[in-house]
Image (cartoon, rainbow, N blue to C red):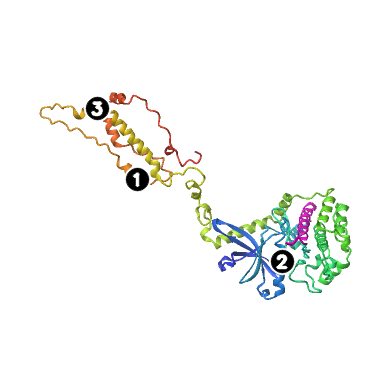
Amino acid sequence: MAKLFDPGAGRQRVDRYELVGEIASGGMATVYLARLTGVGGFQRFVAMKRLHPHLASENEFVEMFLDEARIAARIHHPNVVPILEVGASSVGYYLVMEYIEGDTLARLLARAATRGKRLPIGIALRISLDMLSGLHAAHELRDDTGQPVELVHRDVSPQNILVGVDGIARITDFGVARAASRLTATRVGQLKGKIAYMAPEQATGEESIDRRADVFAAGIVIWEQLAAKRLFKAENEAATLSRVMTEPVPPLTSIVPGLSAGLSNVVLRALDRSPAQRFATCAQFADALEAAALGKERIATPRELAAYVAEVLGDEVLAQREAVRAWIARSEPSQAGSNLAASPSTSVSAAAFSLPGFDGSQPSTSAHNPSSRRRPAWLLAIVGLLLLLVGGGSFLVARETAPSRPVAGIAPAPVPTVVVSAPPSVTAEPPELTPSDSSAVPPPEPTVAKAVVQQRPRAAAKAADPTPKKPKKKTDDDVDLSNPYR
């Protein structure tokens, strides 16, 4: 699990990546949890392996570091941690890998031991098959011309097997891998890797090792998973090396109760000190394991492995997630507790998907041009007014032309002159309305039309307009825009 940095001490960056915490550190490099951000709230966590700055002037270490990136980046397999990028910055060389949420097989074994239990056989077999599958993909790697790269990992160990919460185990760390295309060569007599997981030919410093050295190391890892104890590890490196070279390998049936002899024999064959007697490839090793496990032992599924990881490491994984969330909240207080949908820096505005014609539909006018939705209603009102005026023209003309009989002592009342004109609200743009109230408040009816109708008798109105009026058709203006289910 990563040890997060204090945001208050200043945010650390390497090029476009922000360092969140430290995952692990070795003699050559440090692995960090880093974050890559982008527009629209994009965020991705990665693992960054950065060469120690004091080694930047050491050509051998720099070339070894670049070799790892160049070789491992070619491997594309679900059981190999992919390398996404390699770069150089003011703080040194670095490579970016996919961040696997989970932990190493070494940590998983340690957690099981603290609980007084061994790894379930089915779980151990699932992890072993994933490991062998990833190793075989690395061994089969070819260059651009189609020639075998002859890659040998040389550091297969529980520390370099990542078991994810997704139920998939992946091989990682090709830092000391041997390949024919490496820029650097191992010095004579120099050992690279962990002695407790070395094949005898590798432990003696031979240069002619091949993929069968990884088969031996994988056999050690599988033996230790099932036995829940170390195979060759001793109190010092000299004693460990002696065990690797001469110590007889105990059969698993003498350590694991109920384990089948077939499965034990498969592991013993992988641990044969003669490379010629081992499995020629990791694929053959995996096939033999699967065939032997068809008896008493059952290989766990990825879903069962994910459930086991959650059982053993679930609390730590959740604590890590919460710690990262708290770190982000402290480093970006302006976004803490904010709604993503309301922040233009973290999300795409929903308005972008309602622009006219964006989805192939007719442009909407309710929000962008309110007057265009109201204008048809006013035009209908004017047309209706003109029809009423034409239909009742005789009545109005008779009122205007008939001679009035004056009453003694009373002056005749002036006849009101009706001036047909558009109401001011027709020529002037109506006030802009929001989508929530654009249809809730209907436009006021013209006052002129009301005045004319009030002066007409009911009989005259019926005679002028004998056609029964149809019910008003419901238009978009009458729809409640606040109802999302319309």
Span highlighted in magenta in the image:
118-147
C-alpha distance separating marks 2 and 1: 70 Å
Nearest the eye: 350 or 295:
350
C-alpha distance separating marks 2 and 3: 101 Å
Residue drawn at (52%, 45%), measured in percent from left and top? 359
> Which amino acid is tagged 2?
Glu
The residue that disc 2 covers is: 68
Horizontal and vertical percent for residue 37?
58, 60
Numbered label attached to residue 429:
1
Nearest the eye: 429 or 245:
429
Q: Is residue 86 visible?
A: yes
The residue that disc 3 covers is: 395
Nearest the eye: 294 or 132:
132
Horizontal and vertical percent for residue 48?
65, 64
**Proximity of marks 2 and 1: CB atoms separated by less than 8 Å:** no
C-alpha distance separating marks 3 and 1: 34 Å
Question: Image quadrant of residue 275?
Answer: bottom right
Residue 242 lies in magenta, yes or no?
Answer: no
Residue drawn at (70%, 69%), measured in percent from left and top? 65
Sequence-first tag of 2 and 1: 2
> Which amino acid is tagged 3?
Phe
Sequence-first tag of 2 and 3: 2
